[in-house]
Image: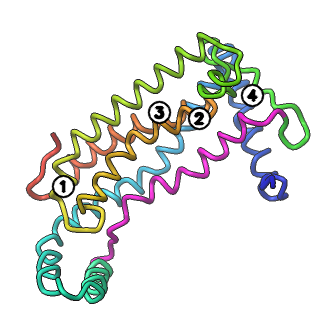
Amino acid sequence: MDIFAFPPLAWLLDAAYRALAGLADLLAPIAGASAAALAVVLVTLLVRALLIPVGISQARAEQTRARLAPRLRELQRRHAKNPERLQREMLELYRSENTSPFAGLLPVLAQAPVVGILYTLFLRSDIAGHPNTLLTHDLFGAPLGTSLVHMLTAGPFSPATLLVSGVLLLIMIVVADLTRRVFRSQQASADDSPLSSPAMLRVMNALHYLTAVFAVFVPLAAAIYLTVTVVWTLVQRVLLRRRYPVPGVRVA
C-alpha cells in the first residue's frame, strides 16, 4: 500500500519536491550537480534551527529532573515494595513540576517526518505524475538516490558512492562516540528518571550508533540529512548544557 497515494500526503510530497527542487535550481550556479545535496544541507539547518526552542525545553527539563533526583530517590525508597504506587507518585511529581521523564525524545520524534519525506523524495522515479529530477543530482559523483546497501547488493558498483557514504558514516560514528563520552557521566548521574536506568542508558548509547546503521540503508540524500543533524545535535547539546548546567555535573 502506497500511503503517498492518499491525496493530502501526495500533495505534501509534491510540495516538498517542488520546494527542494526550486532551492536546488537556485544553488545550481554555485554548486553544479551537487546543488540538491547543498539544498538538503540547508533544509537540515533550517529544520534544526526551528527546533532550537525544543532543545532549550529539553535542556531545562534535564535541569529539573536533576533537581528532583533526591525526591525521586526518596520515593523509590518509600515505595520499593509497591511498584504501581511508585510509578503513580513519580508521574505525579513530574506533573507537578511541569516536566516529563521522556522530554528528550521530542526532537527525535519531531524530525521523523522530515527524514521520511527525504527518504521518499529520493526513492521515487516520479512525483505526483512527473519525473523526479532530483535523482539526476549527485554529491561528488555519488547519486543522491542510491544507498550504500543498494549499491553493494544490486549495483552498479560506484567508487564515488562508496567513498562519500564512507565519509558520512565515519563522521556519524565519530560524533556518536563523542556524544557518548561527553554526556556519559551526566546521563548516569543527573536524575533517577526511567531514562537513567542502566538498561535504558545502554539503549540510549546504542541509539547514537544506530543512526549510522540506519544511514547505510537510506538514500544518500537522507544520509546527508542525518549527518548534519548529529553534528548539530552534539554542538547544540554542549552549548545548552553550559547555558543550563545540571547541578553537580559538568560537560566533559
Please state which amino acid type lies under the numbered disc 3. Val
User: Disc 3 versus disc 1: distance between alpha carbons?
Assistant: 27 Å
Q: Are marks 2 and 4 in contact (CB under 8 Å)?
A: no
- Choose mark 2 or mark 1, whichever is in front: 2
Q: Which residue is mark 2?
A: 217
Q: Which residue is mark 4?
A: 134
Does the magenta segment cover residue 120? yes
Disc 1 packing (10 Å; few <14; some 14–19; many ≥20): some
Disc 3 packing (10 Å; few <14; some 14–19; many ≥20): some
Q: Which residue is mark 1?
A: 188
Residue range in magenta is 97-125
Q: Is residue 140 left or right of residue 50?
A: right
Query: Residue 212: horizontal and vertical position, in percent?
Result: 46, 35
Q: Which residue is mark 3?
A: 228
Q: Does any portion of residue 29 appear in the rendered image?
A: no
Label 1: which secondary element:
helix
